[in-house]
Image (cartoon, rainbow, N blue to C red):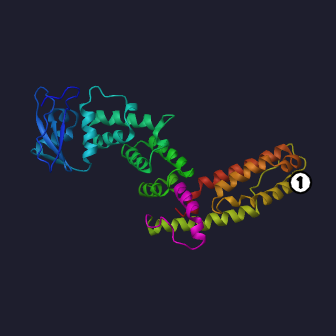
Amino acid sequence: MVAARGQRSTPYSMMNSECPIPLRRTLSYPGDDDRVIRVQNMRFKVNANILRAGSSAFKNIFKSQDSPVVLSGHTAAQFRAFLWAVYAHPLPTAKTLDIPRLCSIAEVSFKYGFDSLKRWSMDGIRTKVNAPNTPLRTAPSETFVRLIRLALLYRDADLSRSIQSKWLTRIHWHDLPPVPAILIADAYDLRHLLCHAYYVHLVDVSALIADGKRLMDDSLLSPTQTLHVFCGYHSLSALWRQLQETPPTFSAHPQCTSHARCQVVWAARWALETGRSWAFAPVDVLCRLLFMERHLEMDELVKSCMTEGCRREALDAIARKRGEVSDNLQHHFDL
């Protein structure tokens, strides 16, 4: 079939298996060995020699199956993206492709051991993920789930950490729901992602728990996962009550000559400010501590009645406590 004017002839063709439209002819290559591959309800007419050259898996597939070859484990859309990359010469730079297409190519390339496309697609994904204007700033949860699975599939720990960090940033900003992160992190034992996703979810549902109401997303979580949420509720609530009564301790600055006075002033202002952090959920210890640090840093009485060295030590103690809570969330959720 000759391509119409202004249209490029395609190197492979597709048709719905339920529609008896003849398959379009592939591009001609020396020694062509055209085969039909069926994926879901789509059929693709491909040049078997090109697929054999890039993958030993396809060599075995074409030996063991007559046309049409039936493939599974991926969608027709994924396989179409893969074939596009197989026949693209030269391959474009990764920045011209979106992440979903790169994911499809990487997924199918891994399945069939197409090494050249594995390297190219994963290099493109790394570039996209780590770019200053990364598309992950606006990507949906489904994209993060897909990328996490790919990073684990390719055993790329650095990529996995980068994806998790960007995902958690958006989850903590309540730009994305935490439940999808809980599900994928629990499935693959991604402890840091799991703890912080549980934390944000708990903040979202803590008022319901306090009122004894049914959790909005408990149908998505397993009974065990829901139990972890309740563990976090009781543990973090108790932690905040403890912090209200006892501020983080700080050491006397070497140049301080009246540390006892500094401690009295700090305890008094701490008690006052903890009563003002009511805008945050009682279990939101991280935000409450950040609130305390920022407000006490600007507190004029603290500035005038404490030595500068002790004031800095006290503020640093809040920051350390916040880091300690963040790093040990797994204990609060009994993970």
Residue 63 belongs to magenta span: no
**Identity of the amino acid at label 1?**
Arg
Q: Nearer the viewer, residue 326 or 67?
A: 67
Q: Nearer the viewer, residue 288 or 327?
A: 288
Q: Nearer the viewer, residue 239 or 98?
A: 98
Quarter of the image where one finds residue 147: top left
Question: Does residue 115 appear anywhere in the picture?
Answer: yes
State the predominant SS element of the stretch in magenta: helix
Q: Residues within 10 Å of mark 1 (few under 14, many from 20)?
A: few
Residue at 30 percent of width and 34 percent of height:
117
Give SS at disc 1. Answer: helix
> Does residue 58 sit above or below 30 in this rendering?
below
Question: Does residue 111 appear anywhere in the picture?
Answer: no
- Could you say where residue 159 lies in the image, as x and y percent from the top left? 45, 41
State the extent of the magenta-drawn residues as a range: 195-220
- Could you say where residue 240 lies in the image, as x and y percent from the top left? 68, 62
Q: Is residue 148 left or right of residue 21?
A: right
Residue at 85 percent of width and 55 percent of height:
265
The residue labelled by disc 1 is 261
- Quadrant, the N terminus: top left
Residue closest to the far front: 5
- Could you say where residue 155 lies in the image, as x and y percent from the top left? 39, 44
- Could you say where residue 36 lies in the image, as x and y percent from the top left? 13, 42
Residue at 24 percent of width and 37 percent of height:
83
